[in-house]
């Protein structure tokens, strides 16, 4: 249905993947409260975080965001890890200091 290039893939991410993980990539398109929608080569999917990945997150910035690439499990229902970000677009939260 899609190619990685159509989803915005860049060679920047190649060194962070195993061959097995390459077939389980998804690009986050919508974030909700503990739920995510993403696009894969096959189409749209709904995802959740694994418990082990959730325990490694120490700040909200580390959570998957729209545009992030993630590695899913074999059934493409949960996120195992987020690939490193090439760029960041960060907004200040009203009322909070930098």
Image (tube, rainbow, N blue to C red):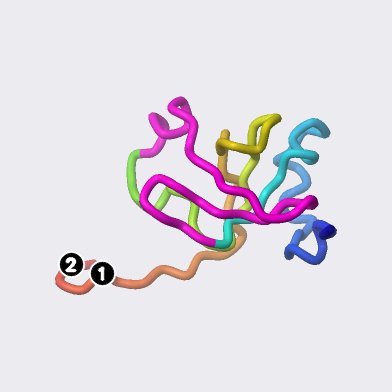
> How many numbered marks, from 0 up?
2
Q: Residues within 10 Å of mark 1 (few under 14, many from 20)?
A: few
Give the secondary structure at mark 2: loop
- The residue lying furthest to the left in this view is 95
Residue 18, how many percent across, how many down? 77, 33
Residue 38: name its quadrant: bottom right
Residue 5 relative to residue 24: left or right: right
Q: Quadrant of the N terminus?
A: bottom right
Disc 1: which residue: 93
Span shown in magenta = 30-57
Q: Residues within 10 Å of mark 2 (few under 14, many from 20)?
A: few
- The residue lying furthest to the top in this view is 52
Residue 91 relative to residue 1: left or right: left
Residue 91, how many percent across, how many down? 36, 72
Residue 44 relative to residue 41: left or right: left
Residue 55, how many percent across, how many down? 38, 29
Residue 44: name its quadrant: bottom right
Residue at 82%, 60% (x, y): give it: 2
Residue 56 in the image: above or below residue 84: above
Q: Quadrant of the C terminus?
A: bottom left
Disc 2: which residue: 96
Residue at 79%, 52% (x, y): give it: 41
Residue at 70%, 41% (x, y): give it: 16
- Disc ID at residue 36: none
Is there a contact, CB below 8 Å, between mark 2 and mark 1?
Answer: yes
Give the secondary structure at mark 1: loop
Residue at 57%, 34% (x, y): give it: 80
Residue 61, how many percent across, how many down? 39, 53
Cα separation between marks 2 and 1: 6 Å
Residue 56, magenta (yes or no):
yes
Residue 58: name its quadrant: top left
* In-front residue for pair 54/48: 48
């Amino acid at each position: 249905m899609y190619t990685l290039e159509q989803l915005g893939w860049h060679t920047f991410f190649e060194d962070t993947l195993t061959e097995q993980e390459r077939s389980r990539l998804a690009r986050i398109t919508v974030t909700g409260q503990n739920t995510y929608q993403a696009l894969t080569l096959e189409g749209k999917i709904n995802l959740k975080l694994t418990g082990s990945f959730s325990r490694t997150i120490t700040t909200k910035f580390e959570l998957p965001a729209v545009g992030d690439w993630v590695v899913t499990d074999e059934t493409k229902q949960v996120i195992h890890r987020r690939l490193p970000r090439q760029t960041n677009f960060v907004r200040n939260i009203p009322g909070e200091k930098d």
